[in-house]
Image (tube, grey):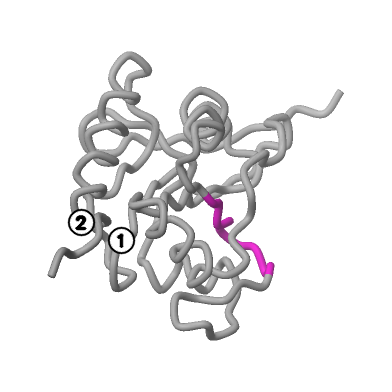
Amino acid sequence: MKRRSFLASALPGGALSCLGVRQVDAAPSTLPAARSLKAELGVALRLTRPLVVMVSLEGCPFCKIVRDQHLLSLLQDGQPVVQVDMRSPAPVLDFEGRATTHDELVKAWKVAAAPTLLFFGRGAREVAQRLQGSSIPEFYGAYLEQRIQAARLDSAPINR
């Protein structure tokens, strides 16, 4: 049996993240991959919700925990969630409808660690603080809910 390893790093606040060495033992993504951020954001805004984008790294065990324990249930409850993969050449249309790749988006967003959650609202702006790494399990859900609530305020329709 081959030994597989990963490099875990602590982020501020004690959060853990994957910084690059692949671990093949973690299950593949079960979140929808981002294909057209413009269209996906449009769906989210019609639901008066933010678009949650998970930046993941293939094989990252912390990404798997965040996906399995938090994001899949949000997705099932109707919260728009997509995944963008670090180092992936998978094609995607950005918020302007331009062709790019997952990895190019990650670099443009200056995301350095996985998992990182981003919350997008009107105007394709980040509308809540990023959630980086995998915090203590007892608190991660609360941090996530707090950010979604903050992002919803900026994703609600503008009354004129």
Image quadrant occupied by the N terminus: top right
In magenta, the rendered stretch is 82-90
With 129 as the anchor, is 23 left or right in this view?
right
* Residue type highlighted by circle 1: Gly
Please tell me whether mark 2 sits on a helix, a strand or a loop.
helix
Q: Nearer the viewer, residue 7 or 70?
A: 70
Q: What residue sits 29% from the left and 31% below the top? A: 145
Please name the residue that numbered disc 2 is placed on: 154
Indicate whether residue 84 is drawn in magenta.
Answer: yes
* Residue type highlighted by circle 2: Asp
Q: Contact, CB < 8 Å: mark 1 with mark 2?
A: yes
Q: What residue sits 47% from the left and 33% below the top? A: 74
Question: Residue 41, percent across and down?
Answer: 44, 63
Residue 91 versus residue 61 in the image, above or below: below
With 89 as the anchor, is 9 left or right in this view?
left
Question: Residue 57, percent across and down?
Answer: 57, 48
Please tell me whether mark 1 sits on a helix, a strand or a loop.
strand
With 16 as the anchor, is 152 left or right in this view?
left
Quarter where residue 134 is shown: top left
Tell me which numbered mark, 1 or 2, is placed earlier along the sequence: 1
Question: Residue 146, percent across and down?
Answer: 22, 34
Residue 152 versus residue 102 in the image, above or below: above
Quarter where residue 133 is shown: top left
Residue 80 versus residue 87 in the image, above or below: above
Which residue lies most toward the left here? Answer: 160
Q: Nearer the viewer, residue 142 or 134?
A: 142
Tell me the distance, in whole angstroms, between the alpha carbons under discs 1 and 2.
6 Å
Please name the residue that numbered disc 1 is placed on: 121
Q: What residue sits 35% from the left and 49% below the top? A: 49
Which residue lies most toward the front here? Answer: 160
